[in-house]
């Protein structure tokens, strides 16, 4: 059975299309690697690629793309709204099929070691690959950004997991790790009162006493004339889409409003949807192997 | 984008494992063909294979498997509970991905023509490929079974669509056609009264005034101590799983009972489940291309 893993590397170049093209070229025309998507943002000056494939082939293409990015991006002259510490800012690996989180962690470490040696780049392991709790969260690692990394790396607590304690002069520092797929799920409410969306978001998210793997904010969707609870579900196997949805429904009662509908932004793992269907239909003993299309990938 | 089509040929051999093995061998080790499953039944003396692949590769492997079956099965000595008219009884093609029903119909006709010539076999087109309304339904074509086919084929109304008007001496007659995927969906009720399941089944099925693409019967599930509405959904794009489920829920109220749970037997197309998830969550503008695993198949 083929192992499938996903990688969503973030590169600090969102404007120069010729450079972006050179970077994603590493993912094209490979036999066991598929470039699903890449999106660059002018304001953020950042490009995010979504690549999927067999572990070894994916690993090789990611290492090569990182090399191209380091050759083409100079962080000393980089400006953008999105915080960043590296030309290749962050490289998350996500297990998709026939592969465990432990294997994804192992792969992330191989990539981290390889790029640190090959490109003389300081690398932090983050999320599930983190070597200590204070390195799990990317924003903690990135605190200080490129400009502050030189000083940060000299602190005993911020010695990188791989590579030198010196910032790469043009490429900065990179975080590599394994994590669960992230689902961007938004629920629209039949009110235009932003306070209600904020209120419900606070109630359902982890930081407000809500669901463990749910991040949420209230958003005013002006073009639809409604407000929305905008969520990131960071582990759908533990915090299900339908759980978040039903919890929002419960909260709407307090305000005498209703749910208008919802949207999933970007990609979603098959299992998150089949699990939702199985919940509402009360399907017993359902297996992903019963999904026709899933079987084709074996 | 790769076109994917499914074929579920039914062979009249469910006992002799060496013969079954020879038949399914045609589906093994092919580059663009995958044997998902095959199940033989001693009582039915029948084997059903589920094969999926790219149209041309699948076509070739099906034609070759039919040849092997004709060489190995002698219907003159075949006995089993399941009605049959051919060594290769029926060969349905089901469009799965990036392929239209019209293309599946076209492919079924190519196979029908090819096997009629190559094996001197009378072939009827059925279901969506049928050339006249009275040939849509397989059971109408198969009426009379192998033993009665000699006489039937001489009737002007039952001249085969391809091949001779003479039954193949050992292989009989074969039906080939295109159809939608079929979903076997059962809903368990918290009662052991078989009349209630019968009653609900009659109410929700097409023949009883219910849903257009729903066949249903009541079944007594003795080992679970409950009864069940057992359904075949013959076009999930028009009669959705959740519609049948919610309609059963509505009917249970008449009897003051509840739904215990449900089960999907065998394979189910991805879209049938994502459509169900999208219904219950009210997802707007959802596309199958958002499903990570679906994208890998491109």
Image (cartoon, coloured by chain):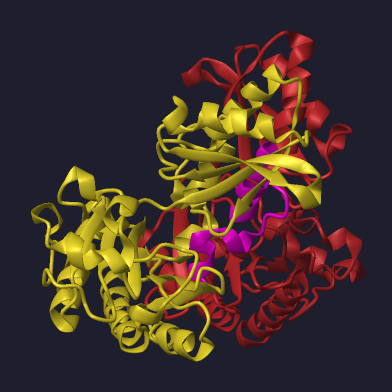
Chain colours: A yellow, B red
Picture quadrant where residue B11 is located: bottom right
Q: Position of residue A213 (x, y in %)?
A: 42, 38
Vertical comparison of A174 with B274: above or below: below
Instruction: Give the quadrant of the N terminus of chain A.
Output: bottom left
Range of residues picked out in magenta: B269-298
Residue lying at 42% horizontally and 32% vertically, measured from the top left: A207
Q: Nearer the viewer, residue A265 or B76?
A: A265
Percent across and percent down for residue B30 are 42, 79
Q: With A220 as the anchor, is B29 left or right in this view?
A: left
* Residue A96 on the magenta span: no
| Snapshot quadrant of residue A239 | top left
Q: Judge whether A171 appears above or below A237 on screen.
A: below
The residue depicted at 77 percent of the width and 41 percent of the height is: A226
Q: Is residue A296 left or right of residue A177?
A: right
Q: Position of residue A258 (x, y in %)?
A: 75, 28
Prevailing secondary structure class for the magenta stretch in the rendered image: helix
| The one of A26 and B122 positioned closer to us in this rendering | A26
Please report the residue visible at 78 percent of the width from the left and 20 percent of the height from the top: B251
A185 lies above or below B242: below
User: Which quadrant of the figure has residue A217?
Assistant: top right
Query: In the rendered view, does A272 fall on the left or right side of B5?
Result: left
Quadrant containing the C terminus of chain A is: bottom left
Furthest residue in direction top, as rendered: B256
Q: Position of residue B285 (x, y in %)?
A: 72, 55
Q: State left or right for residue A28 relative to residue B137.
A: left
Can residue A1 be seen in this snapshot? no
Task: Say whether residue B270 is magenta.
Answer: yes
Q: Nearer the viewer, residue A12 or B36?
A: A12
């Amino acid at each position: 059975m083929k192992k499938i893993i996903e990688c969503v590397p973030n590169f600090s170049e969102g404007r120069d299309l010729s450079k972006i093209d050179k970077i994603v070229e590493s993912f094209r025309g490979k036999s066991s690697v598929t470039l699903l998507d890449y999106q660059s943002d002018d304001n953020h000056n950042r490009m995010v690629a979504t690549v999927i494939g067999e572990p070894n082939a994916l690993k090789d293409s990611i290492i090569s793309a990182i090399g191209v990015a380091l050759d083409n991006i100079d962080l000393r002259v980089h400006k953008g709204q999105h915080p960043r510490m590296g030309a290749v800012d962050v490289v998350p690996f996500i297990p998709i099929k026939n592969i465990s989180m432990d294997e994804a962690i192992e792969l992330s470490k191989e990539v981290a070691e390889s790029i640190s040696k090959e490109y003389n780049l300081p690398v932090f392991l983050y999320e599930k690959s983190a070597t200590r709790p204070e390195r799990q969260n990317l924003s903690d690692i990135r605190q200080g950004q490129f400009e502050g990394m030189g000083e940060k790396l000299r602190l005993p607590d911020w010695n990188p997991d791989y590579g030198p304690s010196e910032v790469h002069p043009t490429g900065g520092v990179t975080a590599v790790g394994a994590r669960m797929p992230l689902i961007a799920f938004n629920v629209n409410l039949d009110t235009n009162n932003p306070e209600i969306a904020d209120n419900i978001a606070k109630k359902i998210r982890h930081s407000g006493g809500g669901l463990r793997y749910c991040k949420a904010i209230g958003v005013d969707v002006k073009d639809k004339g409604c407000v929305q609870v905008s969520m990131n579900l960071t582990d759908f196997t533990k915090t299900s889409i339908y759980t978040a949805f039903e919890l929002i429904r419960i909260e709407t009662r307090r305000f005498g409003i209703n749910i208008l509908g919802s949207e999933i932004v970007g990609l979603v793992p098959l299992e998150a949807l089949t699990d939702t269907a199985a919940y509402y239909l009360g399907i017993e003993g359902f297996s992903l192997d019963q999904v026709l299309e899933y079987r084709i990938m074996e």
